[in-house]
Image (spheres, helix red, strand yellow):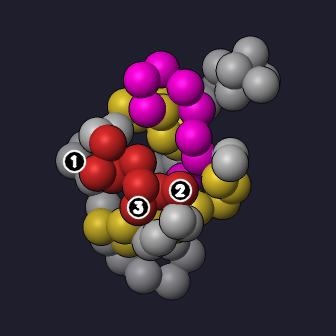
C-alpha cells in the first residue's frame, strides 16, 4: 500500500491527532494548508488520506481511513 501512496504528499501526525483521524473527523486546515489529497501518517505508517473539504474553507475531511 505504501508504494501506491508514494506519489501523494505525506504528513506525520501526533498520537492525539491520530485518534481523531481514525474516527474520520473533519479537521481544521493545517499550516501549510493541504491543497491536495494528503496521506496522514503516524510513526511512518499510512493511516488515512485527507483532502480539502469541497464546501467548507479551512477544513479538511477524510477521503479514506485505513483501519
Q: Residue at x 55, y 66 (%)?
A: 24
Q: Nearer the viewer, mark 3 or mark 1?
A: 3
Disc nearer the start of the sequence (2/1): 2
The residue tagged 1 is 31
Q: Nearer the viewer, mark 2 or mark 1?
A: 2
Q: Position of residue 50 (x, y in %)?
A: 54, 53
Secondary structure of residue under mark 2: helix
The residue tagged 3 is 20
Position of residue 21 in the picture relative to residue 37 (left or right): left
- Residue in front for this viewpoint, 42 or 34: 42
Q: Position of residue 52 (x, y in %)?
A: 49, 63
Q: On the rendered image, what quadrant is the N terminus found in?
A: top right
Is residue 43 a member of the stretch shown in magenta? yes
Q: Main secondary structure of the magenta part?
A: strand
62 w.r.t. 66: above or below: below
Position of residue 38 in the picture relative to residue 65 (left or right): left
Amino acid at each position: 500500500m505504501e508504494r501506491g501512496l508514494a506519489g501523494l504528499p505525506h504528513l506525520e501526525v501526533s498520537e492525539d491527532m491520530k485518534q481523531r483521524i481514525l474516527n474520520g473527523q473533519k479537521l481544521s486546515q493545517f499550516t501549510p494548508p493541504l491543497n491536495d489529497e494528503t496521506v496522514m501518517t503516524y510513526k511512518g505508517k499510512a493511516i488515512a488520506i485527507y483532502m480539502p473539504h469541497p464546501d467548507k474553507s479551512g477544513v479538511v475531511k477524510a477521503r479514506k481511513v485505513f483501519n
